[in-house]
Image: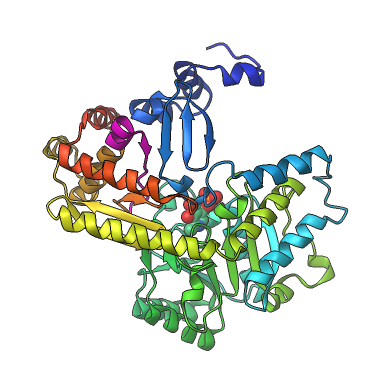
Amino acid sequence: MEKKIFTIDEASKLSVKEVHNLYTNFINPNQSQIFSLLPYGKDNFSHAIGTYMFTDSGKKILDFTGGQGVLGLGHNHPRIINARINFQKENKVEVHKVIFSKYMAALSSSLAALLPDKLNKSFFLNSGAEAVEAAIKVCYKSLNGKNKYILYSDKSYHGKLIGSGSISGSYRIEKNFPKMENCVSFKFNDPDDLEKKIQECQNLGGIYSVIVEPYSASMLESCSDLFIQKLIDLKDKYKFKIICDEVFTGFYKSNYMFYFQKFKKFSPDVLCLSKAIGGGKSSISAVVMDEDVYNNAYNKLSDTFLHTTTYNAFGEESITALEAINIFSEKDFHLKVTNLSKLLSEKLQFLKNKHPDKIESIKGTGILNGIVFKSYLSSLGNIIEKLPLSFINNKSFFLKKLTASAISSELYEKYNILASINDSKNSNHLCVAPALIINENDVNYFFESLEKTLNDGVNTKSLQIIFEFLKSKI
Ligand SMILES: Cc1ncc(COP(=O)(O)O)c(C=O)c1O
C-alpha cells in the first residue's frame, strides 16, 4: 500500500475500509482483522457527546463502556471542553520544565486536599503503567535499595511496561519478555499466603513494597477487611511500603472517592491514579506519595531529578485534571453517583432473578459491575469444543466470556449499545460500568435491551468468524 502524508480533513473523510487497510499496513494486521469482524468494527465514529457516540452513517450509539474507566465524565464534558478551549485561546505556556507551572502546582495541591494529610507529594505522568513504575521506584529508593522484593497479587493488573508488567499477575510477562527481578506473587486477597510470601522474602533480602488493587476493576472483586488488616499489621512488622493502584477505581467509581477509604485506618504510602482524572480528554496519571517516603527517596539535592519525564503535567493536561477534580468534588456529585450505583445494583438483581437460567452471577460495586452469563448458547459450545485445550486454559470459563462477547455484539447490532467485556484472563463478565454522568433513561434503555436480548436469542455468527480466525492462528 502506498504511504502518504494525510491532512486532517483527508483523515476525517476516510472510509471504514480505508481505515482497516491503514491499520493492516501501518498499525497491527491482526488487530485490524479481529476488529473488522466485530459489529462495531464496521462503523467509523464521527463524534461523541456525554454517553452517546455518533457514526459517520448517522447511527446514535449509547456508550455503556465508561471508556474502560477513562470516561468518568462521559465524552466531551462541556466544562472540560471549555477549560481546554479557553486555555488554548489564551496561548498559555505548556512545555517548559525549567520554569514553574502554576497549573501543575495547583493540581498537586488539589490532589493533596482530597487525600490523607501525609499523602501530599505528587508526580505527574501520562499513563497508569508509568504511575506504577514511578511508585515501584520511590518505594525501592525510600528504603535505600536495601530491600530486594516487591509482592503483588496473582490476579493483578498494573500495566504492560517491564516493571508494571512484571507485577501484573494477569499479564504473564515471562512468556514473552524479561521480567523485572525479585517480584513475588501472593494469592489475591489471601492474608495467609501474603504472610507466608513475606516471611519467605524476608529471609532472602527483605521486602520494599506490596502493591494492591484494593478493588480489582478487572475481576470486580474487593480485598476483604481481613486482608487489609493483615497487610497493615505486616507492614508494621516488616516496614515495607504499601502501594495502592487506583488507576481504574479512583474518583467515585466504586462508591468512595478512592476505594482504599473504605477500610478503617488504612492509607497507602503511595497511590497511583489515572483514567478519570483526565476528564476523558487528557492522558495524565499521578503517583501521590507519602511525604516521608518521598523525602527518604528523593530529598538529596543530587536526587532531585532522578525520576522525570518530558510530558510531565503539560499545561493543558493539568488544567483538564484540575477541572475534572472540581467537577468530582462538587457537593451533589457523590450523591448522584450513589443513586446511580443503587439503580444499577437494583436493575442487575432484578435481571438475575428473572433469568436464573441464563445469568450465573452479578458482580461489582458502585458503577463497576458485571454480569457472568451461563453458557446457554449451544452454537458457541459447539465451536469451542473444536479448539485445543492448550489454547484455552479453562474452556468453561472461556465459554462464559464468549457468551458475554456474543451478547455485547447483539446489543450493538440490534440496539445500538456499545458494551464491553474485559480482556483480562481473570474476567468473563459483560461489563456494566457506564460513565458516572449517565442518566436514568439510558440505564433503563440498556436493561430493557439486555432483557430483550436474553428473551429473543443471540446471533453468534460474528463470533464464529472470529473463532475461525483464531483457529487459523494456532
Ligand atoms: C488498575 C490498573 N493499573 C494500571 C493500569 C495500566 O494503565 P495504562 O493502560 O494507562 O498503562 C490499568 C489499566 O487498565 C489498570 O486498570
In this orientation, does residue 315 appear? yes
Q: In this view, which residue lies farthest toward the front?
A: 441
Q: Is residue 390 above or below residue 304?
A: above
- At 19% from the left and 47% from the top, the residue drawn is 395
Toward the viewer: 91 or 464?
A: 91
Judged from this view, the residue extending furthest toward the top is 2
Residue 103's spot in the image, x, y percent? 78, 55
Q: Is residue 415 magenta?
A: yes
Residue 173 image point, x, y percent: 44, 51
Instruction: Classify residue 241 by image quadrant.
Output: bottom right
**On the rendered image, what quadrant is the C terminus found in?**
top left
Instruction: Where is residue 448? Give x, y as percent.
Output: 27, 44
Q: In the rendered view, how is the structure colored?
A: rainbow
Q: Nearer the viewer, residue 406 or 411?
A: 411
Residue visible at 55% across and 64% down? 332
Q: Is residue 381 above or below residue 224?
A: above
Q: Residue at point 29% right, 56% down?
A: 347
Report the number of numbered marks.
0
Single out the residue that lies furthest toward the right. 99
**What residue lies at 40% left-to-right and 52% top-to-bottom?**
433
Q: Which residues lie in the magenta part?
A: 409-425
Is any atom of residue 179 visible in this view?
no
- Give the x, y percent position of residue 137: 63, 64
Name the side, left or right, on which 80 lies relative to 373: right
Q: Tell whether position 135 is magenta.
A: no
Left/right placement of residue 449 relative to residue 112 reads left
